Every structure is written in structure tokens, then in C-alpha cells.
Amino acid sequence: KKIGRMTAVFSSKGGCGTSFIATNLAACATVPTVLVDLNLEAGDLPLFLGVEPRRSIADLIAHRGVFDSELLAAYVTPYSAKVHLLAAPKEVDPIDKIKPEHIFEVLRHLRECYDHVVLDPQHTFDAVTLAALDQSDKIVLVLTLDLPAIRSAKRALQIFDRVGYPRTKTMVVVNRWSKQVDLDLHQVEEFLGEPVIGSLPSDYQTVVNSVNMGTPLVASNSTSKIALEVKRVARRLATGEAHAPAKPKHSWNFFLKH
């Protein structure tokens, strides 16, 4: 069976733009790609794509059994020929029933049906998020250049170290970068002990317009500086070192014990 690659776009602090980046990375797709909304309590990805899902990840989990691409097709929402969305539940009710092992199973099957799986997890190190991060080949760690976000990124890297992720698994991307900010990227790299591999320029109006239109910026304004930088990050992910399927270590157990 083929195993698609999996990328999680993560920030342990809200408001850094992970949903925008995850949506646009998925929309760069040249291969069959599924975007998975793991913000189970407040998933907004349908708005970013201008779609109205009839089914969600909760429905898929409730009816899981024999997974195959035909079954999956009933639960995902197509955005384009290449890109599908597996939405978060609309109601809060089913969330309690979603366990990390369910997420694990769903993601494993998605990798067998798609060449690329892009995840937009919650901003917490809960068991479901860790189940997703464990399985990902790459984690795009997103931060903005303010001290709370930088400190939060540093803590995230320390947690990744503790649960045994190799540093090569994480790619640091700065969002809303602007020359007006006193902190330069070298200082940030020094503090994090990691290179910044992408920096998306700050352009509030362009981003808001694309979100309000429900069209990813890489499609609606593909020559904008932000779109070009997202595409560069996407290419970098696509040409990343050959990945062996991540050997899940179930690091959420580590968190439940501590």
C-alpha cells in the first residue's frame, strides 16, 4: 500500500495564522491532497475554502469499519479536483466520543488514499493533537514575531524534544513578518535554536480578502508575496527527505502519565 506524506501545521498559541497557512499549503497541491480540520471544537476551514461540508470527521469515526476510498469520498468535501476537506464537527456533542486512537486510525487510512495529508490541529498539547503530531512526517511550526508567540514556539520545540521527535521533523515558519518589527529573524533563530525556513510577509488586507472570499490566496492572488512564499514552503515540504512512515510512539501516553 502506498503511504502518503503527512504535514501538521501547528502553533501552541492561537492567532498565529495556522488555519490560513494549512489551507494554502493544501491548495498548492499537485497531487491528491486532503486537508483535515482537527480544531474539533471550533473548526473554520470550510470558510477558508468557501465550501459547505455535509459530513465531518465525527461522522466518519461514528461509521468507521472497513475504510476504503469510496467510503471516504462520502465524508470528505471536495474543494477542487485535487484537494478535499475532512471537516470538523459542526456540533460540539460528538467531540467527547472522539478518542486519540480514532484519529490515529483515520489518519492512517487517509495516508493510504491520498498522497498528501495536511493537518490543522488545535493549539494545545492534548491527546488528539499529539496523536496527529506523532504521525506527521513534518510539523510546520508557525509563530509571529511577538514575545508570547516566540516563547510558545520555544516551549513547543522543548516538548517535541521530550517526546523524541527528531529536529528534522520540524520546520519553523514566521507569519506576518514585517520590517517594522524590531526582532530580526536571526535573533529568533538563536533563541529557538532552529532555522526559520519561511517568513510570510504581513499583509492583513490581502489575507482578510482571501478569507472573506472563501478562496485560498494561492488561488485568488497567486502572485502576491504571501502566496509566493507559501508556494516556496510547499515545494520545500514536497522535496523534503524521503520519509519513512512515522513510527508512532504514542507520545500522548507520556502526557497522560505526567
Image (tube, rainbow, N blue to C red):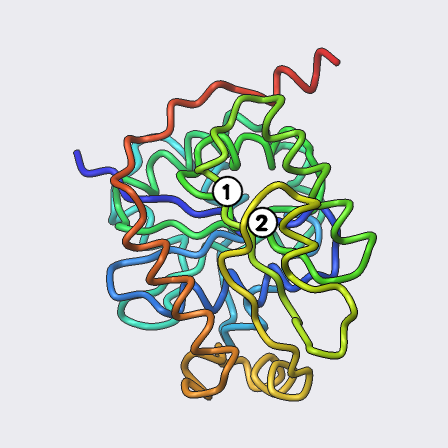
Which residue is painted at 28% across and 43% down in the image?
Answer: 4
Q: Residue 120 at x, y = what percent?
A: 55, 52
Q: Is residue 21 left or right of residue 182?
A: left
- Classify the position of the C terminus by image quarter: top right
Question: Which residue is at the front of the view, 252 or 47?
Answer: 252
Q: Classify mark 2: residues with Cα within 10 Å, few (<14), some (14-19) or many (20+).
A: many
Question: Which residue is at the front of the view, 109 or 181?
Answer: 181
Disc number for residue 92? none
The residue indicated by pointer 1 is 170
Residue occupying the far right of the picture: 148
Question: Which residue is at the front of the view, 158 or 123?
Answer: 158
Q: Residue 39 at x, y = what percent?
A: 63, 50
Q: Residue 250 at x, y = what percent?
A: 52, 19
Q: Is residue 178 left or right of residue 88?
A: right
- Classify the position of the N terminus by image quarter: top left
Helix, strand or loop at label 1? It is strand
Q: Give the answer, above or below, for where 104 lies relative to 37.
A: above
Q: Is residue 3 left or right of residue 188?
A: left
Which residue is painted at 48% across and 52% down in the image?
Answer: 36
Question: Which residue is at the front of the view, 27 or 58?
Answer: 27
Say whether disc 2 or disc 1 marks the residue closer to the N-terminus: 2
Q: Residue 194 at x, y = what percent?
A: 57, 44
The residue indicated by pointer 2 is 141
In the figure, residue 187 lies in which quadrant?
bottom right
